Amino acid sequence: MKLLKGKKAGDVPLLICVSLMACFGCVMIYSASSYTASTLYGDAFYFVKKQIIGVVVGGAAMAAMCFVPYGKLASFRLPAVIISVILLALVFVPHVGVTNYGATRWIGFGSFTLQPSEIAKYAYALFAAGYFAKNYEKVKTVKGVLPVLCVGILFCVLIIIEPNMSITMCVGILMLGLIFLSGTNLKTFLIILIPLALAVPVLIIAEPYRLQRLSAFIDPWASPKDEGYQLIQSLYALGNGGFFGVGLFNSTQKYRFLPFAESDFILSVMGEELGFFGLLIFFAACCFIIYRGFKIAAACKDRFGYLLASGFTLVYGIQVAVNALVVSGAIPPTGLPLPLISSGNTSLIITMASMGVLYSISRSN
């Protein structure tokens, strides 16, 4: 009790909100996956059991990181990049990389699988924070931000060839966000921004399947049984939910009409069951986490803590925003989990651990 009342209590509301969101994710995963899990695996709790393990491990990781002095993480910025590059490269090693639905995004050893791109996002935020904190006088020039730019581009290249356009977008936006927050001037920022913005249409044109997804985004009903199918089913789910939803566990789209209902498109099931007002409450909780993260960053007394808290908060906020835009049809469809909610232990554990780091920074404030 004395610790909670003292100056080093830290941002307890952040931890409470994150923990509640992770538990809520288990409920929604059961609702979205019970029929599919029962049909494919003979166990309605197949996906939620795995998620509960992730919540327990993620909770332990979050608790551990709460009491790790965040300043010590700066010395791990280079090892974090090296480990991430190795893991991203292992994806392409035969019998190590795991391919699903035409994409090789995981590495697997027996029943254990890991998605390196989820780790790479946070490793990049750590590296950028450490570099900019140590070289803050160089951020006004392109040459000064070049190491951060090169590492970001390397990560993007390794991720895009998996292929994984969504995580590539997230890393690219994160890179721009951290360069901007480092204190660089407008000229340097624009010199970096313009080529990266021009690269987006090039990446889309380079792969036929991305052009097909763009076409499906513009007019999904032109290919209702092919590329446009998933977006149409997502829109049906959101529309069916109306203002107040059809009730928890009462979704119809989860009966194998909506692909990836328990993972990338779980927000659609939430919209159908909880309705517009339920989603408002959910996004209010997301905004609360983002607000607390940036508040911690603003109150930090050193550059490394400020940039690390900002980077980890950006990773979470960018991924929530991109996922919401995808399932609502505001941007072309692409696979991306909803942090703390979607099925997938790599994303869940690393996100919860990052929130523990935010708490550690808040304690120092």
Image: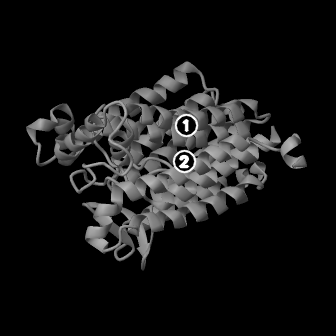
Label 2, secondary structure: give it: helix
63 relative to 324 in the view: left or right: right
Q: CA distance from mark 1 to mark 2?
A: 8 Å
Q: Which residue is mark 1?
A: 285
At a point 51% along the width and 37% down the height, the residue shown is 317
Q: Nearer the viewer, residue 231 or 126?
A: 231
Locate the C terminus by quadrant.
top right
Residue at the limit of the structure toward the bottom, as seen here:
110
**Residue 114 visible, this angle:** no
At a point 56% along the width and 50% down the height, the residue shown is 122
Q: Nearer the viewer, residue 176 or 6?
A: 6
Q: Are marks 1 and 2 in contact (CB under 8 Å)?
A: yes
The residue carrying pointer 1 sits among few (fewer than 14), some (14 to 19) or many (20 or more) residues within 10 Å by Cα, namely some
At a point 60% along the width and 38% down the height, the residue shown is 289
Q: Which residue is mark 2?
A: 21
At a point 40% along the width and 45% down the height, the residue shown is 168
The answer to whether residue 253 is above or below residue 187 is: below
Q: x, y percentage for residue 319?
A: 46, 42
Q: Amino acid at mark 2?
A: Met
The residue carrying pointer 2 sits among few (fewer than 14), some (14 to 19) or many (20 or more) residues within 10 Å by Cα, namely some
Q: x, y percentage for residue 209?
A: 19, 48
**Residue 265 visible, this angle:** yes
Label 1, secondary structure: give it: helix
